[in-house]
Amino acid sequence: MIELDGSQGEGGGQILRTSLTLSMITGTPFRVTNIRANRAKPGLMRQHLVAVQAAAQVCGAEVSHAEVGSSALEFRPGRIKAGDYRFSIGTAGSSTLVLQTLIPALLYASEPSTVLVCGGTHNPMAPPVQFLQQAYGRVLELMGAKVHITLRRYGFYPAGGGEVSASTEPCTKLGQIALIERGALRSAYAEAIVAGLPGAIAERELQLVGERLGWTAGQLRLNELPRDQGPGNAVLITLDFEGVTEVFTAIGEKRVRAESVAGAVVAEVEDYLGSSAAVGEHLADQVMLPMALAGAGQFTMHRISQHAITNAEVISRFLPVQISFEQSADHAVCRLDAVSL
């Protein structure tokens, strides 16, 4: 039984999600206390509870204290089972974070699987579906995994109602990779999404992106969704390099000007491009787990975040890998090395 303190490091939900994924794969039970202790509303929120329930269903786990608001739980996994799964968060909580908990585990099932999650698809503090499809999904593909992610319906806070699905095929041995150089830029574009809101909001956002990044009209895409998928707004900027794809996002909020939303995501892009790293701050958190499952790996990252350090510490509790970070002038290096037992 692995004992985990959910208040360690950045003290967020990633500690729980990583533990669930690796517990399913390794068959190792765990107990976690002080869940999300460093958040404004500590304990399990609805999206975290659904991740626990989904993981339990996928592997037939025994779970104690799985309820909204719980600050501790115990998870005893069974065997991962292939299947056609459907989970509903019931709020605008992040569907993508639930999917990220399940996808690596379902690669270890004996047959193909599908998962449909209903809830939020474009949330603050969570990766949007396009990030899973193009950034995270590309890394998994490079490692030999076959995962297909489909955005069926958008869901914004507070209405939710979005739908995203993933299909997986068995892949019990991920290939080891190194993401060191971005390579040449193959394409770059911005997408401003509005649902149930004036299209002029997206037009203003795209105008600012174009001016700040010096992009042409062909790189600026307006996506006006049906009213029943809103209200909501998001700006996504995608950079597709030879070696890696990055997706940066800002979510519109009430009483926040369109220019401020677009300016926030442009600042992230400029910050990333000002480094020589292959992997941005958020993708770094996500590629670490599949690389650890592969037994070793290496990547250059934009910066060493507390989130990444905490995730590395949790991973090393479940898997025989040593994860180290080294900061240089304009990027950092993360190395994952196998540890002899």
Image (cartoon, rainbow, N blue to C red):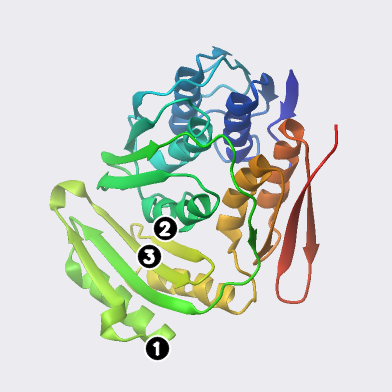
- What's the amino acid at mark 1? Gly
Marks 2 and 1, how far apart at CA: 23 Å
Residue closest to the eye, 324 or 161: 324
Label 3, on which residue?
236
Q: Nearer the viewer, residue 184 or 327?
A: 184
Q: Nearer the viewer, residue 285 or 59?
A: 59
In this picture, is 304 found above or below 26? below
User: Which of disc 1 and disc 3 is earlier in sequence?
Assistant: 1
Q: Secondary structure at mark 2?
A: helix
The picture places residue 137, in percent across and down from the top left corner, at: 45, 52
Q: Residue at x 23, y 52 (%)?
A: 231
Q: Quadrant of the C terminus?
A: top right
Residue under label 2, please give it: 134
Q: Residue at x 74, y 17 (%)?
A: 1
Residue that badge 1 annotates = 214
Q: Nearer the viewer, mark 2 or mark 1?
A: 2
Q: Is residue 174 among the parts visible in the rendering?
A: yes
Q: Is disc 1 surrounded by few (<14), some (14 to 19) or many (20+) residues within 10 Å?
A: few
